[in-house]
Amino acid sequence: MPVNRDKKQQMISFARALEIAGDNLPASRSVELPLIEALNLVAARDYLSLERVPPWDNSAMDGFAVRAADTLGATPQNPVELEVDGVLAAGAAPQLAVRAGRALRIMTGAPMPDGADAVAMIEITDGGQSRVRIFQPVSERLHVRYAGEDVEPGALVAAQGDLLGPAELGSLASAGLARAQVWDRPRVALLITGDELVDPGEELPPGKIRNSNATSLRAQVIDAGGVPDYGGAVVDDPAVLLAALERAAESADFVLSTGGVSMGDYDFVADVLQSAGFEPLFAWVAQRPGAPLTCARRDGTLFFGLPGNPASTMVCFELHVRHLLRSFMRHPRPQRRRVAAHFVEPFKKRAGLMHAARVIAQPPADGVGPWTLRPSGSQGSALLRPLVRANALALTPVEPALVTPEHELEALLL
């Protein structure tokens, strides 16, 4: 059956494209990983502490383990002087108790010895070896970390749905846990198409261009939390593209291609998708850049055919793909932050299309009201430098052709 290439019949709204793709999100899966490999992933189950944290009373300071009552009345002019019976280092079990009128030199993290109920930090003493002079009184429990003060056995240390950052992983480790069940990262296969592409570092013959999409798109996937799989540029040959697509679909959750989705003589993606058994979801979106955006599915794989122009590729990823990768991971904040905004000066666009304008967004000076927007440069779909300068994408209304400062719109903060 021939592919319908009439874009006027195929074109759908930007909002509808988001809805359709979201309804076809591949199923998430959980994996058990060593804690360090679970960084920035989401817990797939609750975790209870296996141990008391800290496991025993310990010193919060370098100083001297003492009986607080023995320091009463100490002043710089009239210090209390105590016998020092030994040294207690971190990692060593106490062998001596602290008796009245005596002390033990103690290091941060060392277990508190029996008899002691406070720590006189080194700064309020003369640091004596066999005898120590203390220049101010200390109160009971001062500079002592008590057993279970942070976590008791059985306490919840990570809940299902928690994003595991460095602090969360540290808390799991301190509670005696070495691994965590988390929602896995999406596997993302990249098919960068085009006979004209030459990788960075190679000689650039006449008529060829640099393959920037392979670098920028891989970086976007990694930044979103995904695992990119890229095996080199794919030439403009339907048989080669079909073989690459079949290989990619075998193991990838998402397949992203660049180029070949418009209406040129070498735009084979739509036909190849059909040959590979993918069900088309949409083929054209009423947006700029990136109107010829293709989405399809097969079994548990979602395909996006992104335009080949570098700015279009990156903008379409931001608008349509990034939040899906993060949703696949069950990330609690899959979306970029959106703010109400308006242009400082009129912005020309094509009527009938939502424009994702590359802009420099500034917050209101008083923290109240909409942000202000200025284009970061030319809006050409092949130009990356305006995207480098941009800190937001302004999502314009579909109508009219001239967006004025009176039009309130949303800006997607990058």
Image: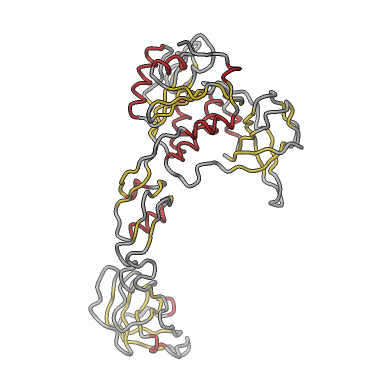
Q: Position of residue 204 (x, y in %)?
A: 47, 16
Q: Is residue 60 above or below residue 335?
A: below
| Number of marks present in the image shown | 0
Tell which of 122 and 282 is nearer to you.
Answer: 282
Residue 290 placed where, x, y %?
57, 24
Query: Which quarter of the rendered picture does the N terminus lie within?
Result: top left
Most extreme residue toward the top is: 265
Q: Position of residue 63 (x, y in %)?
A: 37, 76
Q: Position of residue 333 (x, y in %)?
A: 50, 45
Query: In the image, is residue 86 above or below residue 290?
Result: below
Q: Between residues 7 and 386, which one lies in front from this camera angle?
A: 7
Against 407, is 279 above or below? above
- Please name the residue shown 72% across and 30% down the image: 347
Q: Coloured how?
A: secondary structure
Q: Is residue 5 left or right of residue 218?
A: right
Q: Quadrant of the C terminus?
A: top right
318 with respect to 232 (left or right): right
Q: Residue at x 27, y 83 (%)?
A: 97
Is 348 left, or right, of 200 in this rendering?
right
Residue displayed at 52% across by 23% down: 282
Q: Nearer the viewer, residue 330 or 225?
A: 330
